[in-house]
Image: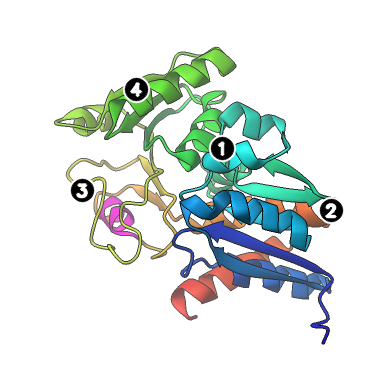
Amino acid sequence: MSIGVSDIYGVIGDPIEHSPSPRMHNAAFKKLGLNCVYLPFRVAPQDLKSAMTGMRALNIRGFNVTTPHKTAVIRFLDELDEAAQEIGAVNTILNDEGRLIGYNTDGLGAARALEEQHQDPSNKRIVLIGAGGAARAIAFTLARRAGSVLILNRTEHRALKLAKDIEQRVGKKILARSLVGNSLLEALQGADILINATLVGMYPRTEQTVATRKLLHSGMVVFDIVYNPVKTQLLREAEAAGAKAITGVGMLVHQGAEAFKIWTNHSPPVEVMRRAVIKELTGR
């Protein structure tokens, strides 16, 4: 029996149950009248290779890639676009007649999320917490425009490696430190933008935060890439400190919109996608 769908897309990760991407992309397909469906696939790390083989065999047209697969998936792909190759992480895969091509739209999504809130990162002092796949994409994208970038991470060698990778590719000095002691307090005293590129504060551990209001100050921008909950504890702390708070919804929507364009060659209905995400996350 035919299900009446011409192309299948999806998102792979572990866990994946709470991803709003299916509702977001299916709303976009419906808006444009495209005969497609987008599904969540929970893929354990040890099954990643099999999942990529299955993608080819089943002719699944495209995947988004989320934690913990953004860097590990690269070795199973046939080609990377320039951004994914530079960043060393993939969040979007296109199946081009059996040839799997990896892209990275996270950095562009983050930049657009800032810009739509009228926050130009050019010449700004940015503090970035995290050194994983999303952090890499954001750091590489913003490093070219920012006045300075300081990467803080619990594991210092990962922060130092990311800084070195950016310096080699971009030709710009990037600072990196371990997230211990007073390092965050000292870093934020002169910062214009704080970006949380970790999963701290994500559902179900919504009480967690990478910084309290005592560390933040009015006039700064606090951007949390966590989108569930929409308003994280970090953003509540930011508002209490008089800072500008930016949710992770914008980045999620814009990275998804760019993936949609890669897969379908159609202009994505961004506001339809945004409304679908907010409805999924808030029930409104």
Label 1: which residue? 89
Q: Looking at the image, do the residues carrying marks 2 and 3 touch, with CB atoms under 8 Å apart?
A: no
For marks 3 and 4 on the same chain, the one whose residue lies earlier in the sequence: 4
Q: Give whichever of 205, 145 is nearer the camera.
A: 205
Q: Amino acid at mark 4?
A: Ala
Q: Is residue 6 above or below residue 128?
A: below
The quarter of the rendered structure image containing the N terminus is: bottom right
Residue at 61% over, 38% down:
74
Q: Amino acid at mark 2?
A: Asn
Q: Amino acid at mark 1?
A: Ala
Q: Give whichever of 8, 28 is nearer the camera.
A: 8
Start and end of the magenta stretch? 232-239
Label 2: which residue? 265
Task: Report which quarter residue 64 is drawn in.
Answer: bottom right
Q: Looking at the image, do the residues carrying marks 2 and 4 touch, with CB atoms under 8 Å apart?
A: no
- Tell me the tag on residue 212: 3
Residue at 63% over, 34% down:
84
